[in-house]
Image (cartoon, rainbow, N blue to C red):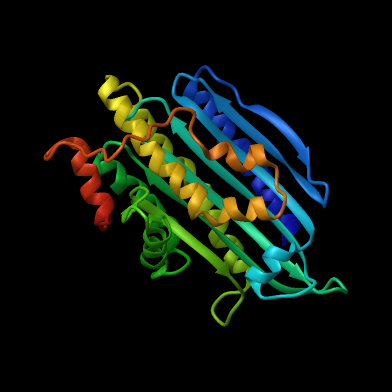
Amino acid sequence: MKDNFYSYIQGLQDAITTKLEAVDGKAKFQEDLWKRPEGGGGRTRVIENGNIFEKGGVNISAVHGALPQSMQAYFGVKDADFFACGLSLVLHPKNPFVPTVHANWRYFEMYDKVGAIVDQWFGGGQDLTPYYLFEEDAEHFHTVCKKACDTHGTDFYAQYKKRCDDYFWNTHRNEARGVGGLFFDYLKADQSKDMNAWYSFVTEVGNSFLDAYIPIVLKRKNLEYDQQHRDWQEIRRGRYVEFNLVHDKGTLFGLRTNGRIESILMSLPPHVQWRYDHQPETGSEEAKLLEVLKNPKEWT
C-alpha cells in the first residue's frame, strides 16, 4: 500500500505542477530534493512571482523511522516505528479575487519492533479560502468535491464537509479559515471498507483537485483590483497564517518529526498584514465574506 500510494502522489505532483505552470504562463516550479537524517525525504516544488501565483508549493514526502517521543505521547504508544507519505499543496494567487487553495492527501503506517504493521490509515482533503466571496465559485468547488465522494459513500460528502468546517476553524477568532471543502483523517479498514477501498476514495479526491480549482482561477484571474482589495487580501492572509501556526496538525507533525522546515512553512504567504482590530465597513463585500466565515453554509 505504501509503495502504491507514494507512486500515486509522485504522478499527481507532476500532473498538478505541469497544469499550474501552463495556467500561470510565466513562473516555473523550483524543485528541491531533500533527505531527512532520521529516514526518508521528499521533493519540494515551489512557484513564486508568476503572472497568477504569487507563491505556492506542491510538495511530496515519504519519511520513516522511530516515532519521536512527542508523537508517541500524541498517539498513546511506546517504542513504535512509522512511515508517512503525502502530497501537500498551498497556492496563494496574486489577484485578490482568485482564492487561495490548500490540499493534502497522506498515508500513515505504524509498526511494532519486529516490523509488523499495527496501524495504518489515510487522511487528507481540499479546501478553498477566498478573499472576496463569489458564491458560484464555492458552489463549483463543493460540487466537484461531492461528485468525488458520492461514488464511494452517499454520506461521505456531508460527513467530510462538516469535518472540514470544524477542522479549519480559527477558534481564537471564532471564524472559519475559508469556505471549506473536504477533510478526513484516520480512514482505517473496517467492516464497510478495506484499505484498497479507502485508497480508491482518497485518490479519486486527489484526481478531482484540478477540476475543482482551475476553472475558478481562469474565471477570476483577469479581474481588475486596487490597493484596497490587496490590503484586505493581506489582512485575511494573516488569519491563514494564524491557523497554520496555531492549529494545523500537518504543520505540528512536521515540526515534531524534524521535518524540513522550508517545506513545512512554504504554506505561508509572502505578504501579510496584521492591523489592530480591523473591521470592514458594514454592508461591504469584505463584510459579506466575514458573515459566511462566521456562519458556514451548505454549498450544494
Q: How many marks?
A: 0
- Looking at the image, can residue 225 be seen? no
- Residue 153: percent from the left, percent from the top? 44, 69
- Residue 277: percent from the left, percent from the top? 27, 41
State the residue in front, 116 or 239.
239
- Looking at the image, can residue 162 be seen? yes
Judge whether 34 appears above or below 179 on screen: above
The quadrant in which the C terminus is found is bottom left
State the residue in front, 266 or 87.
266
Quadrant assignment, res 44: top right
The residue positioned 38% from the left and 32% from the top of the image is 273
The residue positioned 42% from the left and 35% from the top of the image is 214
Judge whether 208 appears above or below 92 on screen: below
The quadrant in which the N terminus is found is bottom right
- Residue 189: percent from the left, percent from the top? 61, 75
- Residue 52: percent from the left, percent from the top? 44, 23
Judge whether 99 appears above or below 112 on screen: above
State the residue in front, 265 or 141.
265
Outermost residue to the bottom = 191
Q: Is residue 237 left or right of residue 15?
A: left
Outermost residue to the front = 276
Outermost residue to the right = 114
